[in-house]
Amino acid sequence: MNKDVVIIGAGPAGIFTALEMLKKGSKKKILIVEKGAAIENRRCPKNKTKHCVSCKPYCHITTGFSGAGAFSDGKLSLSYEVGGDLPSLIGEELAQETINYTDKIYLEFGADEHVEGIGNTEEVKDIRKRAIQAGLKLVDCPIRHLGTEKAQGIYYSIEQYLLNNGVEIIFGYECINLILDKGICKGVVVTNGKEEIEILAENTIAATGRRGADWLEKICAEHNIAHQPGTVDIGVRVEVRNEVMEKVNNVLYESKLIGYPKPFKNKVRTFCQNPGGFVSQENYDNDLAVVNGHSYKDLKSDNTNLAILCSHNFCEPFNQPIAYAQKVGELTNMLGAGHILVQRFGDILDGKRTWQKELSQSNLKPTLPDAAAGDITAAMPYRAMINIINFIQAVDNVVPGFASEETLLYSPELKFYSNRVKMDKDFNTNVKGLYCLGDSSGWTRGLMMASVMGVLMGRRLV
């Protein structure tokens, strides 16, 4: 099979590469290879079963057209300050210009025109003042909230647009290797478990998202693709009553707070805040269960959830950050017998586990009903746990009640970013004909910045 461009992964980076090529009038033959299903065929049975059934061969929440974005809360961060380190590669001005351009594409396909977190200047000043007093930095980023149920419709429209305009997408196939000849990438080998297909292409795009970060790391090592150890984020999903977060939710919708708590002074941040949202579970390879959160446009809960993530950067000789984070997750899963663990913050401070009976007596009811009450500190690394505790107490000065005894912490919340692939501002790697995009490249984090990288790649190929 011969194509001009083969894209591995139908997440935002891969999708927007193809989309921008079409918008610029490209007539090149484009093929997208996706391990999962078309978006209209993605189904999570948990809505009926009320508990995760560990779908095989992959989790429908993380895998399929549009990647994890289809089942996330669908937040588009509209500031270059949020979403990874791509601006340091391409420049802040180009990053912001492309965010604005990409946002208009989302609007074309049905995104809500309302933007959260703009205006309310005096209220934002008050929140920032309290953040400064607590030793935290507030990043007030405008947010376009797609909503979990609306995001699926938007990405379905994009999927159909690509198919109707000549982009070929094959579902149920995963890439098992690159085809290299004298240091030049000539294409890929893919399989559906029954047959292997060689796809030859002038340009190969690896855009496998966080779900495929581990795969890309192994490919980089095998083929000497220049890279450096990346960051992994290890943390928890925090859940509180909406009343606690009411002011921040109304003023900012999503408060992005960053701190460097003593004694270790590692970077700790909030991420993916979901007012009226729901805590959810995702399953990775080897039955690794991790926690996440999402929010709908219409269906609301009584709680707000958000992630608190501690960034880990490792030095030589250690070069397996993803494997390290996976081990933390596996140990936590072991304690929860395959379930997500949940513990009250007050119990952590008291040095005791949480019992199911105690959860049922709280004002705060978990929105992940099959989470197992237990002790997350028995699996969380000491350094990360101390960082998280001290950060939560600092946030309590900004949001009174955040560090209450009944605040819930779910674990493990893990964000896998591939070892950062070395590239120039045109995304050229040291292997001619090979480009690495999105979260798996180590340069972006989240829907918008991955989409932006795809747009710029599409222009480059045209």
Image (cartoon, helix red, strand yellow):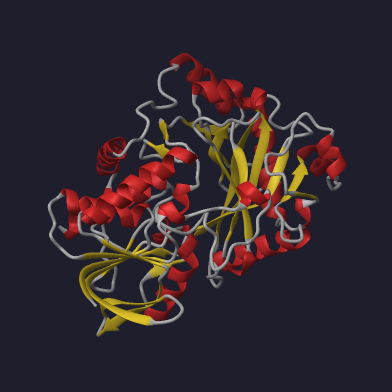
The residue at the point 45 percent across, 48 percent down is 70
Residue that sits furthest to the bottom in the current view: 182
Q: Is residue 87 visible?
A: no
Q: How many numbered discs sit on the rendered protein? A: 0
Location of residue 423 with respect to 346 vertically, above or below: below
Toward the top, the furthest residue is: 122
Identify the residue at horizontal 40%, vertical 82% (top origin). Answer: 195
| Residue 2, image x, y percentages | 21, 76
Residue 291 seen from this side: yes
Q: Nearer the viewer, residue 271 or 276?
A: 276
Of 105 and 326, the residue lying toward us: 105
Q: Is residue 52 above or below residue 30?
A: above
* Residue 418 x/y as whole percent: 46, 63
Q: Quadrant of the N terminus?
A: bottom left
Q: Residue at x 76, y 57 (%)?
A: 336
* Residue 262 position by quadrant: top right
* Side of 23 relative to 262 (left or right): left
Residue 114: image location, x then y, percent: 38, 26
Q: Give how far across and how far down residue 412 sits, in percent.
A: 66, 53
Q: Quadrant of the C terminus?
A: bottom left
